Image (spheres, rainbow, N blue to C red):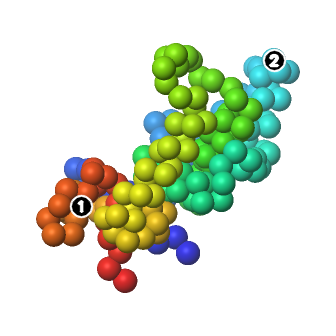
Amino acid sequence: MDERQPLTNPATGEALAKREQPGYYPGFSTLKQKGYWDAATRKVVEDRVSKQKSIRFFTAEEARTMLAVVDRVLPQEDRMEERRIRILPGIDERLYENRLEGYRFEDMPPDQEVYRIAARAFEEMARALHDRAFSRAQRARAGGDSQVGPAGKATGCAGAMEADEH
């Protein structure tokens, strides 16, 4: 059951209807362009949209946390469920295969370690502030005082979550 709040129009506050293809170019289909691509590009794109990637890098708990983070940073409630883009498996694959994006400073930890640190930090904040896992906390609602937690303390989550009253 999807308990997430719908995305809203910032100008009107009204809920956005779920659409098969949200975005700037209604009716445009990237896959209908594959006749113009070379064989290597066609294979990469078709594999990305057709193959279900399993989570191999993250532990089950880390995956739940990071999925909740991705859902809050890049919400897709304006898409029908079957049209949502699965983002976490791509991140997981890159970390599992140790593929870097760009570069990192010499004194910075490897990406794998950074993601594990981040997952732990989200969990620790959620448990300290709301006594529950980050993935179980409700999303903050627009217009609420979601930046203030129990006893008026700042949450530090910048409105990413709020306590579930149920």
On the image, the x and y values in percent for residue 9 come to 30, 53
Q: Which mark is residue 146?
A: 1
Q: Residue furthest bottom?
A: 166
Look at 83% across and 29% down and name the residue there.
43
Total marks shown come to 2
Element under label 1? loop
Q: Is residue 135 above or below residue 45?
A: below
On the image, the x and y values in percent for residue 26 come to 52, 41
Q: Label 2 sits on what residue type?
A: Asp
Q: Is residue 148 above or below residue 35?
A: below
Q: Which residue is mark 2?
A: 38
Look at 44% across and 62% down and name the residue there.
134
The Cα–Cα distance between marks 1 and 2, rounded to whole angstroms, is 49 Å
- Which of 16 and 94 lies nearest the eye of the viewer? 94
Mark closer to the chain start, 1 or 2 = 2
Q: Residue furthest left?
A: 152
- Which of 93 and 59 lies nearest the eye of the viewer? 59
- Which of 58 and 8 lies nearest the eye of the viewer? 58
Residue 57 visible, this orientation: yes
Q: Which mark is residue 2?
A: none
